[in-house]
Structures are given as C-alpha cells and as structure tokens.
Amino acid sequence: MEEDDDDPVVQEVDIFLSKALTERLYLFQYPVRPATMPYDEVEVIGVRMKPKQQKVELELGINTRSVNYSHSKGEQIALNVDGASRGSESAYFASGIMDKQLLVSSSVGNASLQYAAAVFRDDELHLTPVQGVIQLKPNFNYFDKADSKMKESTADDGESSQEEDEAKPVMVKFARAESEAARAKRMQSYEYLQQQKTKEAWLDLNYHTINAELSEMEREQLCSRKTEVEASELHLNQRQYLALLTPELAKDASVKPALPNNVLSMTQLKTMPMGDQIKALLLNAKVIRFTQLIQLLPRDTDPMSILRSLQQVAVLVQGCWVVKSEILYPKDTFSSHSGVSAEILCRARNFVMWKFTQNRSVTRREITSVIKVSQ
C-alpha cells in the first residue's frame, strides 16, 4: 500500500524536564505596556526583589532628550517631590528633573502552574517550570512623598507656635501573658501577615541585558543535561498530555449556593432515591395534589410506585396529599416557636386533619375548644 503524500509526518520528540533554574525562573508581564514598545532598549537603573513574596521593583530611565519629553513638567515634578533638596544626591530625582519611572509588581496567584520555559534543540524539547508570574505596572508613589513633605512642613509650623514647657502625664501599660489560642489567632490575622511582609528585606539585584555574556550562560542551563529528568518515558497520548499541562480546576463541594431553609433545590432532588424525593417534596409543600407531584418527578416513574411511597409519608385529605404529622414533627423534638413537644403538636394537627375529612371548613373556635396549644 502506497502512502498518501498528503498525510502528515509524525515525528517523535524526546522531552526533558530541566530543574537547573526551577527556583529562579520568573515570567515578567507588562499588562499596560503595548507589545510594540518593549523595555529591551530602556535603561534599567536599579532592580530589587522580595523572593518570599515575589515582589519586584524596577527603576527605568526616561529619555529626557526625546522630542516628546516636556522639560518644564519634568522640572516641576522634581521640585514637588524633592523640594529644597532638588538636584542633590539625597533627592529622589538627583538630576533635578524627572528622569526615571518605577515599575512595581502585583500578585497573579497560582498562574505560574500553567507556564514553563521551552527550548527546542537537536530534536529535543527541554522544559523548565516557571517559579512565578509577575506583572509589573508603573507606580507613582513619589507623589505621596511630595504630599507627606507638605504635611510635615505644615505640622512643624503648628508645633513651633505652641509652648513646649507644659508637662503631660504618661500612661504605662503592661501586656498580659498571651495564651496559645490567642497567639495562633493573632498569627492568622491580616495585621500580623502584613507585618511579616514588611519585615522581609529587599534584595538588590544586578540587571544584565538579553545579549550579555552572563545571560547567555544562564540560558544554556535551560538545556543542561546534568540536572534533567527524562520525561519521554511517560508515553502520554495527546489528550493526557494536554490534561497534564492545563488541568481542570477542582470544584469545591463545600461552596454551594445559599438557599432559604424552605427552598428545595431541584438539582439536589434529582440525586435522591424515589422515596426520599417524595418525602422531601412533601416536607417542603406540606400539601400537594397527585398530579402536581407527578410533574415534579422523573417522567418514566411508575405511578403505582409513587403511590406506594406516598402512602408512607402522607395522608389523603379532601383530594390532596398532606404530609404526616410524625414526619413533620419528629419524635423527642420541640417547636422552635412555642416550645411545645412534638407529641402534643402531632395530636393537635391530626385532630385538625380529621375535622377536614368531616367538613369542608373548620372554625378556629371549634379547634381551640378542643386543642390546648399555646398560639
């Protein structure tokens, strides 16, 4: 049999999982930066990072010689931020003009579980898992610095006008011994977690361009055979491989839509046996006609089997099926409204249903003369 020339040629490729850069490989995203304007040619002034929190800050230089740059606006911003220290080494803008911008990272959650760096070389595919995904956006916290300086200067002027000779009492408080439960609760609080994040020190990093010699050496580790584990022996088919790369999110069974106590979910009802379905419907409806009950149950259900199950949980009153009192008020329980025991409630309710079998209507006076139940 001759092979069809149009059939695709399937080529087997060995896949290797590299671990050389697993703990140091991050994916940087710039969601507010156009793809046509990358930061490759932008000068990087400084980089710092908090590894545990995966927080990154990049200081990028601004081309002040560009025809699109406004020198007057740049000088005004530097003056507002640095004030009298504008142009000095301690100023935020040491050049006396806004010549840099700050990019600050934001959390992306567990998105890193879906990413890996891939290198195809010599008919081999090398994969390295990404430690984290970091999104960087411009930050303008230097404007907050200008506002804080203005507030400090205003506060200093107010304090200088007041007399400082007045003595003030000082209250001293002693902390109580903290229990284990209180300590565990405190360590789970939002304030404590924020304090721990603040305590982590920033690490200053060195930036190397994409064509630097050190960058080339690091990229070679993506294909290093010394720390790789061959993954081709897994022999997964296409569907299994895609499921492994992008697993479905597990549904949390504990998260259910909040429904009132007197509302029965039809989706939940369909998962019950026939007898439990009829009991649940009667408990919610209290009174129901047989034709209405059939419409709520599966279409292929035998009417005789419905009737047999119905007689176990309900009684027929004036052409309607009414849930039995012992089903509505279980034994050894009490009413949440009046505190009356279930035994008394059952006797009173059965008397009312018996009266309806005798007459089409029942008066309240006739009921209260026999039943001694508090309203």
Image (spheres, grey):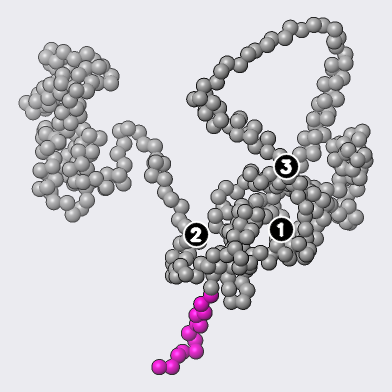
Of callouts 1 and 3, which one flags the residue occurring earlier in the amino acid sequence? 1
Q: Which residues are magenta?
A: 1-13
- Residue 114's image quarter? bottom right
Q: Looking at the figure, which quarter contains the N terminus?
A: bottom left
Mark nearer the viewer, 1 or 2: 2
Check disc 3 and give the amino acid type: Trp
Q: Residue 34 shows which numbered tag?
A: 1
View extreme (front): residue = 226
Q: Position of residue 10 (x, y in %)?
A: 50, 80
Residue drawn at the location 61% of the way across and 57% of the way down? 22
- The answer to whether the residue labelled 2 contacts the one labelled 3, judged by CB atoms less than 8 Å apart, is no
Q: Is residue 2 magenta?
A: yes
Residue drawn at the location 85% of the way across and 7% of the way down? 165
Q: Looking at the figure, which quarter contains the C terminus?
A: top left
Tag 1, which secondary structure?
A: loop
Of callouts 2 and 3, which one flags the residue occurring earlier in the amino acid sequence? 3
- Residue topped by disc 3: 202
Q: Position of residue 72 (x, y in %)?
A: 91, 45
Q: Position of residue 26 (x, y in %)?
A: 65, 55
Check disc 2 and give the amino acid type: Thr
Q: Is residue 350 magenta?
A: no
Which residue is at the front of the view, 179 or 365?
Answer: 179
Q: Main secondary structure of the magenta part?
A: loop
